[in-house]
């Protein structure tokens, strides 16, 4: 987990900023994403990826499952993240992850 991130003022012009739950989810993903290549629970992750579940994200971000599902779908559609899921977990990849790191 990283200790600090940077957000460009351009984010204020994006749709994600208008929706508090979606913005909160995106910032949570940024903080939880891997800082380097690693293996977590048998899943190989690259920098900017995290392995999680909808339920774990909901608990961590204090959101409902519906907000997490909708938020991930909207962030994916906006090109902010890529998501791949299995029956056991979800891997979220932050697009342009390095641009958010201090």
Image (cartoon, rainbow, N blue to C red):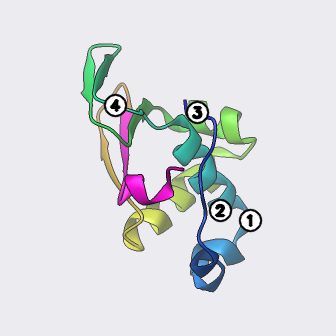
> What residue did someone put label 3 on?
55
Look at discs 4 and 3 and give the one toward the viewer. Answer: 4
| Structural distance between the alpha carbons of marks 4 and 3 | 24 Å
Q: Taking 73 as reference, is 88 left or right? A: left
Tag shown at residue 36: 4
Q: Residue at x 35, y 59 (%)?
A: 95
The residue that appears at 38% across and 43% down in the rendered structure is 48
- Residue 78 % position (x, y): 42, 74
Comparing labels 4 and 1, the label whose residue is closer to the camera: 4
Secondary structure state at the residue bearing disc 3: helix
User: Residue sitting at 39 percent across and 64 percent down?
Assistant: 76
Marks 2/3: CA–CA distance:
18 Å
Location of mark 1 (residue): 20
Side (left or right) of 39 relative to 16: left
The stretch in magenta equals 90-102
N-term mark: 4 or 2: 2
On the image, the x and y values in percent for residue 11 come to 59, 75
Q: Are marks 4 and 3 in contact (CB under 8 Å)?
A: no
Q: Nearer the viewer, residue 38 or 60?
A: 38
Q: Which residue, given by chain and number where applicable, does mark 2 sit on?
A: 23
Q: Do the CB atoms of the residues marked 1 and 3 lie less than 8 Å apart?
A: no
Residue 31 magenta = no
Contact between labelled residues 2 and 4, with CB atoms less than 8 Å apart: no
* Lower sequence index among marks 4 and 3: 4
- At 53% across and 53% down in the image, what residue appears? 69
Badge 1 marks a residue whose secondary structure is helix
The first of marks 4 and 1 along the sequence is: 1
Please name whichever residue, 69 or 3, is drawn nearer the observer in this view of the structure: 3
- In the rendered structure, are the residues bearing label 2 and label 1 in contact, judged by CB atoms less than 8 Å apart? yes
| Residue 84: percent from left, percent from top | 29, 45
């Amino acid at each position: 987990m990283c200790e600090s991130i940077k957000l460009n003022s351009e984010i204020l012009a994006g749709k994600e900023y208008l929706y508090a739950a979606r913005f909160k989810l995106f910032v949570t993903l940024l903080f939880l994403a891997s800082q380097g290549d690693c293996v977590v629970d048998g899943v190989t992750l690259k920098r900017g990826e995290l392995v999680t579940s909808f339920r774990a994200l909901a608990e961590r971000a204090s959101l409902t499952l519906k907000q997490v599902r909708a938020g991930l779908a909207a962030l994916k559609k906006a090109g902010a993240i890529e998501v791949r899921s299995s029956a056991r977990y979800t891997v979220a990849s932050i697009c342009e992850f390095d641009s958010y790191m201090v």
